[in-house]
Amino acid sequence: MERLARAAAGYYRDLTAAAARHGLTMTQAKMLILLRQPLPALAGRLACDASNITGLVDRLEARVSREADTADRRIKNVVATEEGREAVRLVRADMRGTSEAFARLDEEGRRTLYELLGRLHPEDTQKTT
């Protein structure tokens, strides 16, 4: 578990630094990354209170949009705009430490790591694949 915690801490340090270089907080970058697919429980995925989501969305302005849910018009879904998707691409490209860490693994090693991490929290696997 200690190795997993160190790997996660390294990832979040790298994400925080890369996000800052592109004018984002770590939480804003994390939100944009999660928005690559519709997420009904965004606050839960970001580990924050639902009341914080409105402020986050407001601060992301052109990088996200609010769209009415097709099943329930009272619900607003947050969707990444083209500018938001480009911000994610730039942040990920700028995450040098993470890229270097994964480069030390061959393709089989990356597949194995991905599969093993999916086993740790299988309830999240369907949401993020």
Image (cartoon, helix red, strand yellow):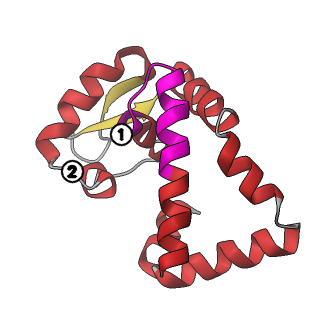
Res 36 visible: no
User: Along the line of sight, which residue is nearer the eye, 14 or 106?
Assistant: 14
Q: Are marks 1 and 2 in contact (CB under 8 Å)?
A: yes
Q: Amino acid at mark 1?
A: Thr
Res 26 visible: yes
* Residue 117 location (% of width, % of height): 57, 76
Q: Residues within 10 Å of mark 1 (few under 14, many from 20)?
A: some
State the count of labels.
Answer: 2
Residue 107's place in the image compared with 28, above or below, is below
Q: Amino acid at mark 2?
A: Cys
Residue 89's place in the image compared with 114, above or below, is above
Labelled disc at residue 27:
1
* Residue 40 location (% of width, % of height): 31, 53
Q: Please report the residue visible at 28 percent of the width from the left and 28 percent of the height from the top.
A: 57
User: Along the line of sight, which residue is nearer the eye, 42 or 47?
Assistant: 47
Q: Which residues are magenta?
A: 12-28
What SS does tag 2 mark? loop
